[in-house]
Image (spheres, rainbow, N blue to C red):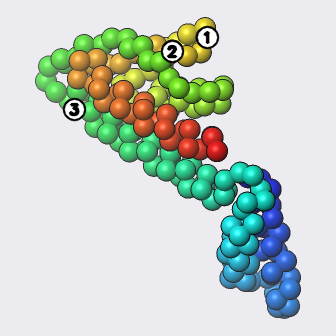
Amino acid sequence: MPAQFLINITIAFLWTLLMDEEAFYLSTFITGYLIGIGIVLIMQRFFGSQFYLLRVYSAIKLLLIFISELFQSSILILKQILSPKLNIKPGIITYEHNMEGDYELTTLALLLTLTPGSVVMEVSPDGKIFYIHAMDVEESREALLRSIKTFEKAIMEVTRN
């Protein structure tokens, strides 16, 4: 992936230099970058990995999923806090994940912890099970499991080929 990006930037700079303009114009550089995307896409079979813009797209999608989950869980927490009677049943959920490697595991744990209402308390010694404290186990268990699966899928799209 870094090689594809560097080749694309190199093509953009060469395009800018070969246009023989008296100044550096961003529009010329962007045109060269777009031409470089086309060249890298045509040469894709020689790189042995997926096209780098697909991974960038997956990272942006993961960010948007996180923002959406953060917003939804914040509204749920806000409803709980503003209700006249606090009617929650906190508890601990165990979840066996499909992450491979420390990077994926840490990313999933951080995304879950940053989402209001859930905290990853501990990871099992073998690294396959999360112990998650949920603010309201009865109502939010299914939503929490659904968001974990969504995060897992999005993280795997970013980190794996």
* Residue at the farthest front position: 45
Q: Which residue is mark 2?
A: 129
Give the residue displayed 47% in from the left and 18% down from the top: 96
Q: Quadrant of residue 75?
A: top left
Q: Is residue 89 left or right of residue 157?
A: left
Query: At label 1, which amino acid type do we have?
Result: Asp
Q: Which mark is first along the chain, 1 or 3?
A: 3
The secondary structure type at the circle numbered 2 is strand
**Residue 79's disc number:** 3
Give the residue displayed 80% in from the left and 73% down from the top: 11
Query: Tags 1 and 2 in contact by the CB under 8 Å rule?
Result: yes
- Residue 13: x %, y % from top left: 82, 74
Q: Nearer the viewer, residue 15 or 87?
A: 15
The secondary structure type at the circle numbered 1 is loop
Q: Which residue is mark 1?
A: 126
* Residue at the farthest top position: 125
In front: label 2 or label 3: 2
Give the residue displayed 57% in from the left and 27% down from the top: 99
From this viewpoint, is residue 144 visible? yes
- Residue 90: x %, y % from top left: 30, 13
* Residue at the farthest left position: 84
Whether 96 is drawn above or below 111: the answer is above
Query: At label 2, which amino acid type do we have?
Result: Ile
Measure the C-alpha gap from mark 2 to mark 3.
30 Å
Q: Residues within 10 Å of mark 2 (few under 14, many from 20)?
A: some
